[in-house]
Amino acid sequence: MQEPISRTGGAVMKMMTGWVWMMTLVLGVLIPATWAAEPVKINSLQTYPEAYKMKVIQVEGTVSGYHMDHFIGNNTKLEKCIQNFIVDDGTGTIQASYAALCNMGPVMLQEGDQVTVEGHYLGTLDVKAVRKH
């Protein structure tokens, strides 16, 4: 015997409502995390360091003092690239460090690059993402 359409439709509707609710919850958690970076001028970081400590911030500027350390991890044997550099936005400078697996295609920087960097402020910038302009 077949179920009446209204009973089947109700089950499908409940399933769809549950799915929509779950997607809304997931997006509600993920979207703020991707928009969490607060654009900041470097002189503001230097003037009010406690206001930004451990926050995810975004800084735009020019790369200088670039140096890359390249090594193989002792335990993982993966190639690691740590790029250390200074970002100058015209209001001040900040030391930044960007660590990534070399073979995973990290953005490779060089002197004079115009960049937007995003990361945790710890007195220096622990970079999580870099975008060249």
Image (tube, rainbow, N blue to C red):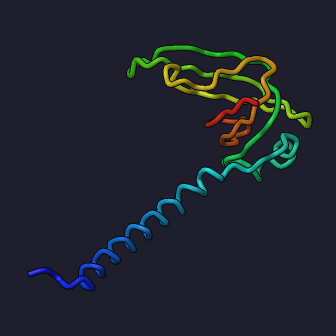
Determine the residue positioned at 27% across, 85% down. 6
Q: Quadrant of the N terminus?
A: bottom left
Q: Is residue 13 toward the left or the right of residue 106 in the image?
A: left
Q: Quadrant of the C terminus?
A: top right
| Pick the front one: 132 or 88 | 132
Q: Is residue 48 toward the left or the right of residue 76 in the image?
A: right
Q: Is residue 12 toward the left or the right of residue 111 in the image?
A: left
Q: Position of residue 97 (x, y in %)?
A: 66, 28
Residue 81's place in the image compared with 125, above or below, is above
Determine the residue positioned at 71% across, 48% down. 53
Determine the residue positioned at 13% across, 80% down. 2
Q: Farthest residue in the left direction?
A: 1
| Pick the front one: 42 or 123 | 42
Q: Quadrant of residue 130?
A: top right
Residue 7's place in the image compared with 38, above or below, is below
Q: Position of residue 116 (x, y in %)?
A: 74, 36
Determine the residue positioned at 81% across, 44% down. 45
Q: Position of residue 39 (x, y in %)?
A: 77, 47
Q: Position of residue 117 (x, y in %)?
A: 71, 36
